[in-house]
Image (cartoon, rainbow, N blue to C red):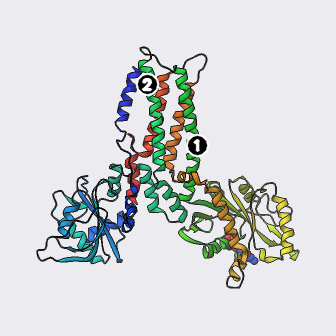
Amino acid sequence: MLQHVLSRAIAGYTRHVPLSRVQLLGQAHSIVTVTTCLQGSHRATPIRKIHSTQSPRPSSTHTNGNDTIYALSTAPGRAGIAIVRISGPGCLEIYSALCPGKWNPKHRYAGVRTLYDPSSTTLNILDTDALVIRFEAPKTVTGEDVMELHVHGGPATVKAVLSAIPRCKTSSPVRYAEPGEFTRRAFENNRLDLAQVEALSDTLSAETEQQRRAAVRGNSKVLGRTYEGWRQQLLAARGEMEALIDFSEDQHFDESPAELLSSISAQVNTMLQSIEHHESASHRGELLKRGIRISLLGPPNAGKSSLLNQIVGREASIVSQEAGTTRDIVEVSLDIRGYLCTFADTAGLRTESTPHPGRKLEPVVIGVIEREGIRRAKEKASESDLIIALASVEPLPHGKGWYIHYDAETINLASSASRAVLVVNKCDRLSKDKLMDLLADFKSEVGAKADNTPLVTISCHDALEKSGVNEKDPGNIHYLMTQLVEVFKNMTGLPMEMQDLLGVTERQRQLLSACSEHLDDFLEEGKERDGRECDIVVAAEHLRSAANCLARVTGRGDAGDVEEVLGVVFEK
Ligand code: GDP
């Protein structure tokens, strides 16, 4: 009975295996002008806006795959060039209507043409010197016939061309593309797998150099091919087990069930190791894509806000900012030398119990609001990928010299964080020699806790006051940033041969993790326990589940991920 169920499951499963996995995204690179036709040029929202206000045909909700679709692929507004992309069976008819009497341009060749209004009998010119490029199915970006019209980018010209296209005489309907419809067709025609669609989504939203790098890696076909290869391997192994289940009683097999299981287990173990690499690489890729979360921690007045201002002023550009109240957390997303970083400038941390080790200063009284600010700061620190623990040079009472003021809890948080950098600010307050002495004391006080943590001395004051002066790195801020970038590299770097793994997304990581759980179950089932033989039917079922997870990664399984992932892309 179980065997029957299993066979049905296989039959159901294999129906979803794609016939062809040829994915030739790269056709656009073969001629120079076509570089603009990469997928990312579709901008869903602006396209809709232009169409609804300017084009005579409103965007249709009817999405018949046989329709010819068109859209403005470049950003709306005044520009030198605008590109209109058309995909579907009506491309040539549209060409003939817009360029009457002209030879069809050769596949993948650009032709300079005058475009005419298709409904005018007096050859009303829409645009002169337009560049027309034709791509013949199936090796096109959507897998269908595609045509690109590179027209002058004035809003009136674009409007005239867009409104002319649906008036061309064609044998099948022509309509404005739904958001993301070009990508959907590419996916449906096997030009892209789901991993590539996700990478496309990342490419569209990449704001920093490192985000772009990670997205480009995911765009390569390497990941999809790898997962498909693993899936095929699991299916083949399962097939052998199935044969054993079905025919072992009637036929002679070279391998005993135990031998077969042991050879499959060896393959599964190797696969599990590779999955582990992919999972850990995905964390690094995620850091690049979603940004490195950094908490600036330290006692009040250590100079956290001053440091953030210095970083923003000279070393980074703001990507986005979320203001908090004085006791709340201010978050700023910055592009620091290509790395997206979200800085949380937290409330100052101080503790009633351990105010200043070794020094008699007035006891600290912490009010309710400040306590809440501190709680939030700690919470933020625990979610961070990196902690910058700030201390500062402060005067001892009665002019008795200087000391390095730090918060013991901040140092504890930094020492237990996966990554941290210690920063001592206000170093302008004393000479280099005296600073060295203080640093030696400071290191011996916090030493054991922060042994492997880099320590950088800075002065936000000097950075501000001496910025125009002929000094290379006033206040040492540039050096601090170089140290931070080194930490970023360590957190996100991968050896050259593993760079493609940066493209593994969080969704893929979760599916890989589920896949490895099924593979673990398979290995567990394969073990002989208390003289009990393994249930080969159950073991085969674990392989099927594992293979199914991999199918969902590339979007060729029965799962609902396809719509979910495409939906995310379309939103962008
Ligand atoms: P936060 O409470 O940690 O955010 O500290 P702030 O950035 O608001 O700075 C607290 C005080 O220290 C302000 O009066 C700053 O002008 C001063 N300050 C900040 N950085 C330096 C520095 O490098 N040297 C000196 N002498 N004062 C500084």
Q: Which mark is residue 276?
A: 1
Pinpoint residue 510: horizontal percent, then vertical percent. Answer: 51, 44
**Depth check: 128 or 444 in front?**
128
Q: Determine whether the beta carbon of the residue marked 1 sits less than 8 angstroms from the nearest atom of ligand 1.
A: no
Q: Which mark is residue 242?
A: 2
- In the image, is 179 to the left or to the right of 96? right
Hey, what amino acid is under mark 2? Glu
Hey, what amino acid is under mark 1? Glu
Instruction: Check residue 363 for magenta coloring.
Output: yes
- In the image, is 226 to the left or to the right of 529? left
- In the image, is 224 to the left or to the right of 494? left
Eye-nearest disc, 1 or 2:
2
Region in magenta: 362-367
Write down which quadrant ligand 1 falls in: bottom right
Give the residue displayed 61% in from the left and 54% down from the top.
383
Instruction: Give the mark nearest the N terminus, 1 or 2.
Output: 2
**Depth check: 471 or 290 in front?**
471
Give the residue displayed 43% in from the left and 57% down from the top.
200
Residue 169 can be seen in this image: yes
- Disc 1 is placed on an element classified as helix
